[in-house]
Structure formats: structure tokens, C-alpha cells
């Protein structure tokens, strides 16, 4: 019989995975993070090394050549990568987001081809495209159109702010198949980068997470075979919402990693730096800030673990990923602001690590559903 109660103890395998991700972060991510950030270098080399040892594409099932990690295991790795550099972690982990529509709604043949042959076999990048210039939070408001013609779909429109778009070989894209049907008229397609009419536009220059690539995708009369439809026609909105339930714990876990980095850097600095004859942590205003970082880090991590564990049960309460994402993102932002404060003037300088943490953190309150949208989800669930 399964033991009753709530367990916080990781299995031996999970602890091993966590150690492996921590070592990888220490050896491969932290030494290059500042340079990749400054030059906005896409971390393809790091992705390749992580792919070799199964630390990326983690949610791809074993049947399709992946490691078939559980959501909790993915979160353990995301926290370690997030500790090292959330720009690098966003880019090297993005395939797991792009794979989700296929994992959740794809046919076996689609999974064999796109997950097995393309992502695992060829080691390609893929992107996930929902957002458009005029529709971000309002997913149902997208205007990209997919019209059925002679057994294929003709796609016209554009996507913006798409992570890894400049490097992806294919995109999982949401488009309206029946604009009059509102959110029930949306569908999801795999579109190949080299299909005629597909182009990627401007690569954005960003405040933070600069090692991650963010660009536009344009579709001009792109003929997509009907076999590239993922799931049912018209079921795209529900698929997009389900994808977010699965992806948000991992995003929140990266924010948890960033919180731990803020905490450890702050503890180290506040122990060494003296003001008025004592280490600055002994000034309560500073010590308490760091205590709050520790509380919020622990609480965020527990919410992430709970949300991730729920996903394995198959019964999803959308409040839990929303709790984890909103809380971890908001507390990570506060932790980065406070870490700079702990460092004083040095915190504002690029020679110290917290300046980058402050630039990197802000996006956690924006992508994968803003902090406001997470609260809207929670309100919707509480009052339904
Ligand atoms: C670096 C980066 C990477 C990204 N990667 C991807 C990606 O790979 N794929 C992808 O599809 N998208 C991606 N995005 C897009 C991201 O998910 C959107 O930017 C985000 O969902 C917000 O949409 P928006 O920018 O259009 O803001 P808007 O929707 O215009 O929102 C503006 C502000 O209004 C608030 N707001 C809007 N509606 C409401 C409401 N109903 N209630 C309360 N407040 C509201 C928002 O919270 C926000 O503060 C990325 C964005 C960035 C910056």
C-alpha cells in the first residue's frame, strides 16, 4: 500500500538528477553566463551537451527516444539551470514547451516523427507560437488564419516574441480555423521553417535573458498539409490552456533557481561586507530582507513541487500551476530587487552577479501568462 501523507523527500534517482544538473550548471552554464548575456549568444553548444546527457527535451517519452522525465524531475533540473542563468535555461529548455502540444494531443505518427525523429534524432530546435502583436494575454484574440483548401491549410499571419524562433526547424503554431467561432475556432499546427512563405523577422534586443533568442515569425500563404494539424480542429484554445498548465511549473522552477541565486549571493556578500563596524547582515533591515528571500524561496519551491506532482496524477487543478507561477515570479522579482539593495552600489555594477539577476528576472512576471493573468485564472477557478 502506498504510504499516506505528504512527502518532501526526493527519491535517490531524483537526488542524482538534481546533482547532475547542479554539476552541469556549475561547469557549463555559470562560467559563460555573463559573456553570453553581454553578447546575446545563443547557447546552442550548451544545449548539445545537455542533450547528450538527457537534461533537455526531458518530457519526451521514452517511446520516442526521450528520457520521459516526470514534471517534478523537469522542475528539479529547471531550478538548477535557473540558478546558473535564466537566459540560457529559457533557450535550452524551450523544446519541452514546443513538444507539449504534440505530447498532449498528437497522434502516435506525429509523435514518432516530430518528437522522435526531429527533436531527439536530429537534435533540432522547435518553438511554440501563440503570441501576436495585438494578442498576448488574450489568446483567443489571435488573428493568424488557417483556411482549409483542397485538403490542406493555408496559413497567413504572424507571431511575435517567439523564443528560439531564429533557430527552430519547426514551430507549433496556433491559428484561427473558424474566426466566427471565437475561442472554439482555434487550432494548432506544426509548421516547418523551410515551407514556402515562412520567414522569421526581427530578433529582439532585450533587457534580460539575453542569451535566449526572441523573434517574429511571418506566414504568407503557407500551405500546411492536413496531417500537420495537432489534435482536433477547433480544439486549439483548450490545448493551449492545457499546455500552460503543464509548462508553468517548469517556468516557475527556473524563477525559484533565480531566487536561490539571489539568496546565496546575498548571504555571501552580507557576511563579508561591513558597515558601521559590523557585517551588514547584522543590521536588521538587511538581515530581514535576506530572511524574507529564504522564506519566499522555500515557499515558491513547495508550490512548484506541488503543482508538478499534481501533473503526474493526471487530475489538474489549474490553480496550482497559477499559484506556483505567480508566487515564484513575484517573489523572484522582489528577491532580485532586494539582492541589489543588499549589495548597495556594487549591486548596480556589472562586475557583480546581482545586476544581471535583476535584468533577467522581470520576464518571469510576463511570459507564459503574466502575473495578472495567473490571478485571473485563480479568480475564475475560485468563483466558478
Ligand atoms: C522574452 C519573451 C519570450 C517570449 N516567448 C514566447 C514564446 O515562446 N511563445 C509565445 O507564444 N509567446 C512568447 N512570449 C509572449 C508572452 O507570453 C506575452 O508577452 C505575454 O503573454 C503578455 O502578452 P502581451 O505582451 O501582449 O501583453 P498584453 O496582453 O498586452 O498585456 C499588457 C499588460 O496588461 C495586463 N493585462 C492584459 N489583460 C489583462 C486582464 N484581462 N486582466 C488583468 N491584466 C491584464 C497584462 O498582465 C500586462 O501587464 C514571450 C515574451 C517575451 C517578452
Image (spheres, rainbow, N blue to C red):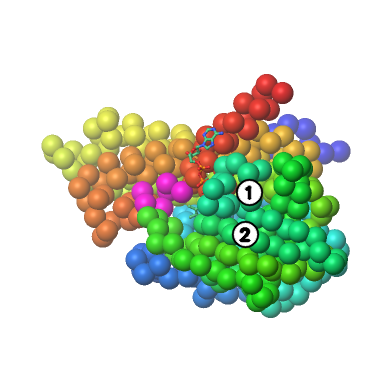
**Res 171 label:** none
Choose the circle earlier in sequence order: 2 or 1: 1
In the foreground, 265 or 235: 235
Please report the residue visible at 83 percent of the width from the left and 52 percent of the height from the top. 232
Q: Are marks 2 and 1 in contact (CB under 8 Å)?
A: yes
Please report the residue visible at 72 percent of the width from the left and 47 percent of the height from the top. 179
Q: Is residue 331 left or right of residue 272?
A: right
Q: Secondary structure at mark 1?
A: loop
Q: CA distance from mark 2 to mark 1?
A: 9 Å
Q: Local crowd at mark 1 within 10 Å, few (<14), some, or many (≥20)?
A: many
Asked if residue 228 is positioned above or below residue 345 in the image, the reply reads below
**Residue 231 visible in the shown view:** yes
**Res 157 label:** 2
Asked if residue 167 is positioned above or below residue 344 in the image, the reply reads below
Residue with the most extreme top position: 383
Please report the residue visible at 77 percent of the width from the left and 32 percent of the height from the top. 4
Where's the N terminus, which quadrant?
top right
Residue 184, quarter of picture:
top right
Which residue is label 1 attached to?
Answer: 142
Q: Magenta stretch? A: 358-363
Amino acid at each position: 500500500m502506498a504510504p499516506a501523507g505528504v512527502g518532501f523527500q526526493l527519491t535517490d534517482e531524483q537526488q542524482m538528477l538534481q546533482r547532475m544538473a547542479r554539476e552541469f550548471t556549475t561547469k557549463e552554464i555559470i562560467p559563460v553566463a555573463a559573456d553570453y548575456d553581454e553578447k546575446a549568444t545563443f547557447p546552442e553548444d550548451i544545449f548539445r551537451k545537455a542533450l547528450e546527457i538527457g537534461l533537455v527535451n526531458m518530457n519526451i517519452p521514452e517511446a520516442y527516444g526521450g528520457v520521459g522525465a516526470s514534471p517534478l524531475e523537469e522542475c528539479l533540473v529547471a531550478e538548477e539551470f535557473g540558478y546558473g542563468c535564466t537566459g540560457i535555461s529559457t533557450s535550452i529548455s524551450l523544446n519541452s514547451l514546443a513538444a507539449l502540444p504534440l505530447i498532449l494531443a498528437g497522434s502516435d505518427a506525429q509523435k514518432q516523427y516530430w518528437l522522435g525523429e526531429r527533436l531527439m534524432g536530429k537534435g533540432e530546435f522547435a518553438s511554440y507560437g501563440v503570441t501576436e502583436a495585438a494578442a498576448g494575454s488574450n489568446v483567443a484574440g489571435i488573428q493568424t488564419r488557417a483556411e482549409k483548401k483542397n485538403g490542406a491549410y493555408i496559413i497567413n499571419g504572424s507571431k511575435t516574441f517567439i523564443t528560439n524562433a531564429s533557430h527552430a526547424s519547426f514551430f507549433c503554431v496556433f491559428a484561427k480555423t473558424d474566426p466566427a467561432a471565437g475561442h472554439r475556432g482555434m487550432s494548432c499546427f506544426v509548421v516547418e521553417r523551410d515551407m514556402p512563405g515562412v520567414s522569421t523577422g526581427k530578433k529582439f534586443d532585450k533587457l534580460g535573458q539575453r542569451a535566449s533568442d526572441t523573434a517574429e515569425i511571418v506566414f504568407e500563404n503557407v500551405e500546411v498539409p492536413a496531417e500537420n494539424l495537432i489534435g482536433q480542429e477547433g480544439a486549439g484554445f483548450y490545448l493551449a490552456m492545457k499546455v500552460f498548465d503543464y509548462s508553468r511549473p517548469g517556468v516557475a522552477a527556473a524563477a525559484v533557481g533565480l531566487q536561490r541565486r539571489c539568496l546565496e549571493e546575498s548571504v555571501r556578500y552580507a557576511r563579508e561586507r561591513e558597515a558601521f563596524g559590523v557585517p551588514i547582515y547584522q543590521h536588521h533591515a538587511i538581515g530581514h530582507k535576506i530572511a524574507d528571500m529564504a522564506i519566499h524561496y522555500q515557499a515558491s519551491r513547495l508550490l512548484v513541487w506541488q503543482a508538478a506532482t499534481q501533473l503526474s496524477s493526471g487530475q489538474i487543478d489549474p490553480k496550482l500551476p497559477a499559484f506556483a507561477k505567480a508566487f515564484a515570479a513575484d517573489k523572484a522579482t522582489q528577491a532580485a530587487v532586494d539582492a541589489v539593495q543588499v549589495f548597495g552600489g556594487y549591486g548596480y555594477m556589472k562586475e557583480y552577479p546581482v545586476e544581471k539577476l535583476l535584468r533577467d528576472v522581470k520576464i518571469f512576471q510576463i511570459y507564459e501568462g503574466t502575473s495578472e493573468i495567473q490571478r485571473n485564472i485563480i479568480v475564475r477557478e475560485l468563483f466558478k
